[in-house]
């Protein structure tokens, strides 16, 4: 018989990009939550998932109803997308079946919004032959075309290949961003397919005003989408380990609402704030933007005086603004100084630092990463030299929450 005074222990494997996962031994009575995102599919199963979404009428008419033979169709992929090759193959196959000539299909890829994006778009290979496949460069202004002005009179530019097309199929990932309190800016045509100056203005505004700047972004995004006349929107929900968990297709707002429901698996409920939250990243070698999102997610379910521990293979050192803030310099003054310089690198650094400070609060942050000890200690952060350090933290803590791929999560206290 098991003695009642001997606590039972649960062993939780946590992948963080090393050859072997962390093995977190946590007493059952100390484990608050072990949170994982939804399981997804890859390969042919991902292609079938997207194909099925095109036939659903929940968020709008099927894909083939948007095109007629002779249409020039542009497929616009905004930022990072899970299972991109399979997604594009499903779209192209369905368009050809609807009578569109392969030569009349253009595939356009845009990089994620910096410093907001967390991934590197994978190449969509092994897709049916189409007319052209090009990468959109926001720094190349001739690639864009003027469409309209927003409420403040600012010009709205979008990729010329999208503007010139008869039909645009918009593809973007729908996800959560805990640093913004929920909704991610990724996956939208604007400003992803706009000029670099527009992208930089978004970051400046967020740096100066924080979350209040999101309202203006949403208005301009809706204006750009409406002016372009996009009715065919594919919103994707990532699964664990770069798989595809769900897809919603239809009119812009309807597809987004459906995707939000389908992404509920990345919003786990946690019964209480833990004194220790251990978090991994969806891309173990992700940089400061991914670290920010993971810390913001973990902080939501960590006691204000508790500890957040992020385990990864991160090797990117945070910028000078972040370093000076951690050394004790007043954050507001640092942000104003960075914005005043007009230097896009300093502004991006100030943006991340502002949202990082808001998320972390007074909590302690411990890093297991590829950064060296001197660098981490200069940043006034806790340094975990080995996986065993994190394993001991978990075993000794009175309350522990584990977040797998925390940067994709928006956990909540249930």
Image (spheres, rainbow, N blue to C red):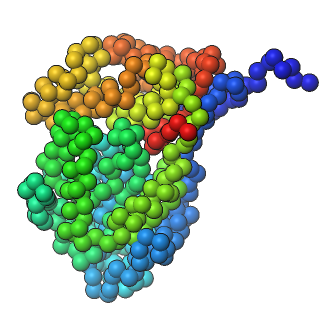
**Left or right for 267, reference 154:** right
**Left or right for 43, reference 369:** right
**Left or right for 71, reference 293:** left
The x and y percentages for residue 23 are 63, 27
Residue 162 appears in which quarter of the rendering? Answer: bottom left
The one nearer the camera, 106 or 281, is: 281
The x and y percentages for residue 144 are 14, 61
Q: Which residue, as the protein is rendered here, is positioned at the far right?
A: 1
The x and y percentages for residue 218 are 26, 54
> Relative to 383, does residue 238 appear above or below in the rendering?
below
The x and y percentages for residue 370 are 43, 24
Question: Is residue 240 in sight in this rendering?
Answer: no
- x 18%, y 30%: residue: 346
- x 37%, y 51%: residue: 80
- x 37%, y 86%: residue: 99
> Relative to 281, does residue 41 appear above or below in the rendering?
below
- x 50%, y 39%: residue: 412
The number of callouts visible is 0
Of the 4 image quadrants, the one containing the N terminus is top right
Of the 4 image quadrants, the one containing the C terminus is top right
> Relative to 88, does residue 375 appear above or below in the rendering?
above
Question: Is residue 191 in sight in this rendering?
Answer: yes
The one nearer the camera, 121 or 272, is: 272
């Amino acid at each position: 018989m098991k003695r009642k005074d001997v606590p039972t222990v649960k062993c939780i494997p946590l992948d963080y990009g090393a050859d072997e996962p962390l093995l977190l031994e946590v007493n059952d009575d100390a484990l608050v939550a072990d949170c994982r995102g939804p399981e997804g599919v890859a390969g042919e199963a991902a292609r079938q998932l997207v194909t099925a979404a095109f036939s659903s009428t929940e968020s709008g008419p099927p894909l083939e109803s948007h095109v007629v033979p002779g249409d020039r169709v542009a497929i616009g992929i905004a930022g990072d997308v899970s299972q991109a090759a399979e997604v594009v193959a499903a779209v192209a196959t369905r368009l050809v079946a609807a009578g569109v000539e392969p030569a009349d299909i253009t595939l356009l890829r845009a990089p994620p919004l910096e410093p907001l994006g967390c991934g590197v778009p994978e190449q969509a290979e092994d897709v049916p032959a189409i007319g052209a496949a090009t990468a959109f460069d926001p720094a190349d202004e001739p690639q864009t075309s003027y469409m309209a002005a927003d409420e403040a009179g600012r010009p709205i530019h979008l990729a010329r290949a999208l503007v010139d097309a008869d039909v645009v199929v918009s593809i973007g990932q729908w996800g959560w961003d805990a640093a913004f309190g929920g909704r991610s800016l990724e996956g939208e045509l604007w400003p992803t397919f706009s000029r670099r100056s527009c992208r930089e203005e978004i970051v400046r505004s967020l740096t100066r005003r924080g979350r209040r700047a999101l309202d203006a972004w949403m208005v301009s995004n809706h204006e750009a989408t409406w002016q372009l006349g996009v009715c065919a929107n594919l919103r994707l929900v990532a699964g664990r380990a770069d798989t595809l968990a769900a897809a919603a297709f239809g009119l812009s707002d309807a597809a987004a609402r459906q995707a939000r429901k389908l992404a509920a698996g990345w919003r786990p409920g946690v019964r209480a704030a833990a004194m220790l939250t251990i978090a991994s990243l969806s891309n173990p070698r992700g940089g400061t933007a991914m670290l920010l999102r993971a810390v913001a997610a973990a902080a939501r379910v960590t006691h204000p005086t508790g500890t957040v521990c992020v385990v990864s293979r991160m090797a990117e050192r945070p910028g000078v603004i972040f370093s000076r803030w951690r050394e004790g310099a007043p954050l507001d003054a640092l942000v104003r100084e960075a914005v005043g310089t007009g230097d896009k690198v300093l502004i991006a650094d100030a943006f991340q630092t502002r949202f990082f400070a808001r998320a972390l609060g007074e909590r302690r942050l411990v890093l297991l990463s590829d950064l060296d000890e001197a660098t981490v200690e200069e940043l006034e952060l806790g340094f975990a030299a080995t996986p065993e350090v994190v394993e001991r933290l978990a075993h000794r803590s009175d309350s522990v929450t584990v977040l797998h791929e925390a940067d994709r999560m928006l956990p909540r206290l249930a």
